[in-house]
Image (cartoon, grey):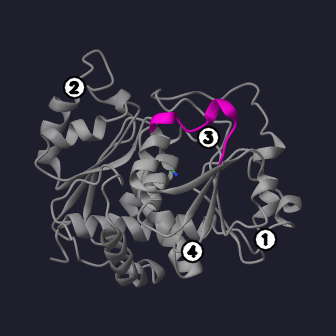
Amino acid sequence: MRSFAGRDILSLKEFERNEFEHLFEIADRVEPIARERRNTDMLAHKTLVTAFYQPSTRTRLAHEAAMHRLGGHVTGFSDAKMTRAGDFYQESIKDTVHMLEFYGDVIVMRHFDQGAPHEAAKWSSVPVINGGDGWGEHPTQILTDLYTITKEMGSVDGKSILAVGDHRMRTMHSLGYALSQFDAEMVILAPEEMSPLPEFLAELDEKGTNYRIVDHIDEAIETTDVIYMEPVVQPDYTKARQEKQEVYARTDAKYQVTTEVMKKAKGSSIILHSLPRRDELLPEVDDSRHARYWQEAYNGVVMRMALLSSVLGVWE
Ligand code: CP
């Protein structure tokens, strides 16, 4: 297995099965710290730098919470407009990263440009973690989600995962790449204009991801083990920010999960949603036995603890 110490986490494209398993094992080891709401001194002499060029609640704060749980320090920005990268100067990724690398020991970056964290990693002497890049990828979210499936269902293997929502979305890309390493089926459901790109499907073919495409949630709901959701009403991820709309489009019933739809689902099936949500997943489902998105959010802290401690060399 490749070492995690000093490694950039930019994509799940090249992640190997034993690397997923290794991170799941580390997550199990650090989980009691989060569960008991303790802060330790594991990373007492390390600092995380957050560089967020797009809004985030979970990804930035879960990384920050993870760093605090491990006794480390946090600095950074959550709005590039208040930095020289987002004002008159439009400072380049290269110049910005040549500053950030001196302010801490690991950088987590979210950016509206696909590939921006990869560009940052080229210039950074410290590890760079991709917190979501344009439509590109969202590796730490999918690591969290596969860890959640493992905890809730024993294994990712043998599962049929219905991925419903916008398939141009970065989570869907990381999911498709990751599932190539498991004996699982990816069932793709998206509105036509949000279908996976042919290039992406060609990559899945090449990597050996087992997938099929359906047109309506009713075609898969009875056989699926995991309903993995993304909104179909969402912002343009290539933009720094989109303001609140006066009127929002409504999610078509074909892509919506309701208590009525869940009556047709396997009793053991679970629903994951990386959140935020709109009306594709109604709050009426929150109290059902299927909902696991709050557990997923908790695991988001645990997985970031595993990742930060791993890239900062604790386990080697
Ligand atoms: N799931 C996720 O990436 O959420 P945020 O946009 O709030 O970070």
Q: Residue at x 28, y 54 (%)?
A: 9
Q: Which residue is mark 3?
A: 166
Q: CA distance from mark 1 to mark 4?
A: 23 Å
Three-letter code for the amino acid on which mark 4 is drawn: Gly
In magenta stretch: residue 196? yes
Question: Which range is magenta?
Answer: 188-199
Compared across the picture, whether 13 is left or right of 107 comes to: right
Q: Position of residue 11 (x, y in %)?
A: 33, 50
Earlier in the chain: of badge 3 and badge 1, it is 3
Q: Which residue is mark 1?
A: 288
Using the image, determine if residue 193 lies above or below residue 301.
above
From the viewer's perspective, is the residue at label 4 or at label 2 nearer? 4
Q: Which residue is mark 4?
A: 158
Residue 56 visible in the current orientation: no
Q: CA distance from mark 4 to mark 2?
A: 45 Å
Q: Residue at x 28, y 64 (%)?
A: 308
In magenta stretch: residue 149? no
The quarter of the image holding the N terminus is bottom left
Q: CA distance from mark 3 to mark 1?
A: 24 Å
Q: Contact (CB < 8 A) between labels 1 and 4? A: no
